[in-house]
Amino acid sequence: LNPFGLLYEEVTASNLVKVDLDGNILSDTDAQINPAGFVIHSCVHRERHDLTCLIHTHTTAGAGVSAQPDGLLPVSQTSLLYRDLIGYHDFEGLALNIEEQERLLADLGRDKQLLILRNHGLLACGRSIPEAFIMLFYLEQACRIQIAAQAAGSVRTPPPEVQKLTHQQAMRGFGSALGVMEFAALKRRLDRMGSDYAT
């Protein structure tokens, strides 16, 4: 987990905090972790062995869509990419109650990799770091597009058969290499800016 109290720009590979499934800090560090982050992440790592990386965000667009009664709407190509992989989890207050894990896991199920945490934010779960990253990237983009489209007035959605087709087309490319090219490109960009992130 990322150390509690750091800005995202301060998080590096070496200051991530290794934690076991019981919440014990295994890293040689004085850093603390966010207890809510532990509640959310640990249950998925414990129960979904197919998922190795989780990324949880509280962006304006993600939280904005999470607060809408209908959640993510099929208003863009991007919103249709992973539509059948998205679940929803109702807000129960700050995620400090260990009993919430059971309900969160039920909402994620065995077939979802994305959760819209209502009135809260987004959670992407990948079989690899690049996969989790690219899925979150596109979910965030879909949320931004929705908020922008709604700000301009009413929105138009494609017919259901086109929505289904778009999702099926996207899933044909949904293999083990999902996000690998994009993640490598972003790492090259970071390397050009400086390699501090890798320390």
Image (cartoon, helix red, strand yellow):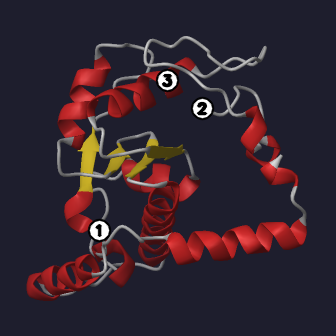
Residue 96 picture location, percent across and down? 45, 16
Label at residue 82? 1
Q: Nearer the viewer, residue 99 or 158?
A: 99
Vertical placement of residue 162 versus 108, above or below:
below
The amino acid type of the residue labelled 2 equals Leu
Say whether disc 1 or disc 2 marks the residue closer to the N-terminus: 2
Q: Which residue lies at the image location 46% right of the left edge and 44% below the top edge? A: 54
Residue under label 2? 1
Vertical placement of residue 106 versus 142, above or below:
above
Say whether disc 1 or disc 3 marks the residue closer to the N-terminus: 3
Q: Write down the quadrant of residue 83 in the picture.
A: bottom left
Confirm or deny contact between disc 3 and disc 2 (CB under 8 A): yes
Q: Is residue 70 visible?
A: no
Q: CA distance from mark 1 to mark 2?
A: 25 Å
Q: Secondary structure at mark 2?
A: loop
Local crowd size for mark 1, using a 10 Å CA cut-off: few (<14), some (14–19), many (≥20): many
Q: Write down the quadrant of residue 153 in the picture.
A: bottom left
Residue 17 picture location, percent across and down? 66, 27
How many numbered marks appear? 3
